[in-house]
Image (spheres, rainbow, N blue to C red):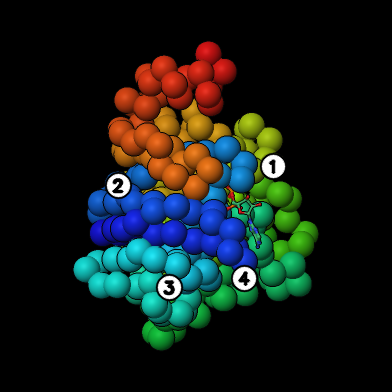
Amino acid sequence: MLEVKKISVSYLGVPVIREVSFKVEEGQMVSIVGSNGAGKSTLLKTISGLLRPLSGEIIFLGKRIDTLPPYAITSAGISHIPEGRKIFAKLSVSDNLLVGAHTRDSKSEVQKSLEEIYTLFSILKERKDQRGETLSGGEQQMLAIARGLMSKPKLMMLDEPSLGLMPSLSVKVIEILKRISSNGTTILLVEQKVKDALELADRAYVLQTGSIVQEGTGADLLKSDSIRKAYLGM
Ligand SMILES: Nc1ncnc2c1ncn2[C@@H]1O[C@H](COP(=O)(O)OP(=O)(O)O)[C@@H](O)[C@H]1O
Ligand SMILES: [Mg+2]
């Protein structure tokens, strides 16, 4: 479904992503794990068109997307939930959700998605007329994920969705991801929380200072000595 081929990305001439290649197959949950500063957010921003690669190609559903503007990439079926849950503080919960559907035409279809979202996230239904800023951190993250679903993505990319949440809420985020995945949406997750991300993943990649240094099934990587030493403190 998504194929990233040897992409390199720099900020003002400083290389941050070096010839990174990986694949996401339809229906999979793929995790890219790495420490702070490894280049995870840069990678997702490049796929969603917010940054341009210096070289390499990004193919989605058989078409090159690395030359398209962000809205066209969203329309093609990729939704990006950025780091730090950037919801609209002054908009109501329901308006935040409708913003997520801005690339879709059919009002009745959008209304149907809204109802589905309220079934999946009952807390958002209860709070639908409240302003975004009045939600707790965990509820704001649910809203950010739900807004990402409103574009009806084929591929959903999430940037550290449980960052800053207390453990009980992280567990909830993981449950939601599992549910989204079992509903048929393909997921690309980038995470610093290596254990959680590998447990979830069908396939996983380790990103270290801008390069992929290891790949395999989530289960295999969890057993790997180098990963246990470097990331799991064992
Ligand atoms: N806008 C920017 N300008 C310059 N350097 C940046 C910018 N954003 C990130 N970087 C640098 O790029 C590297 C990768 O950052 P990032 O992709 O945010 O990593 P991660 O998400 O894995 O923590 C880091 O060294 C970071 O300091
Ligand atoms: Mg990041």
Kind of residue at badge 1: Gly
Across and down, in percent, residue 16 comes to 54, 54
Which circle marks residue 55 in the picture? none
Q: Please tell me which of labels 4 and 1 falls first in the chain.
A: 4
Measure the C-alpha gap from mark 4 to mark 2. Answer: 28 Å
Gap in Å between the C-alphas at discs 2 and 3? 19 Å
Q: Do the residues labelled 2 and 3 touch (CB within 8 Å)?
A: no
Q: Do the residues labelled 1 and 3 touch (CB within 8 Å)?
A: no
Label 1 crowd (10 A; few <14 / some 14-19 / many >=20): few
Q: Earlier in the sequence, mark 4 or mark 2?
A: 2
The span from disc 3 to disc 4 (Cα, nearest Å) is: 16 Å
Among the two numbered marks 1 and 2 on one chain, the one whose residue lies closer to the N terminus: 2
CB atoms of marks 1 and 2 within 8 Å = no
Residue ID for mark 4: 96
Q: In this view, does 221 lie above or below 87?
A: above
Give the answer, above or below, for where 150 lies relative to 34: below
Q: Mark 3 or mark 1, which is nearer the start of the sequence?
A: 3
Asked if disc 4 and disc 2 are in contact, CB closer than 8 Å, the reply is: no
Q: What element carries label 2?
A: loop
On-image quarter of the N terminus: bottom left
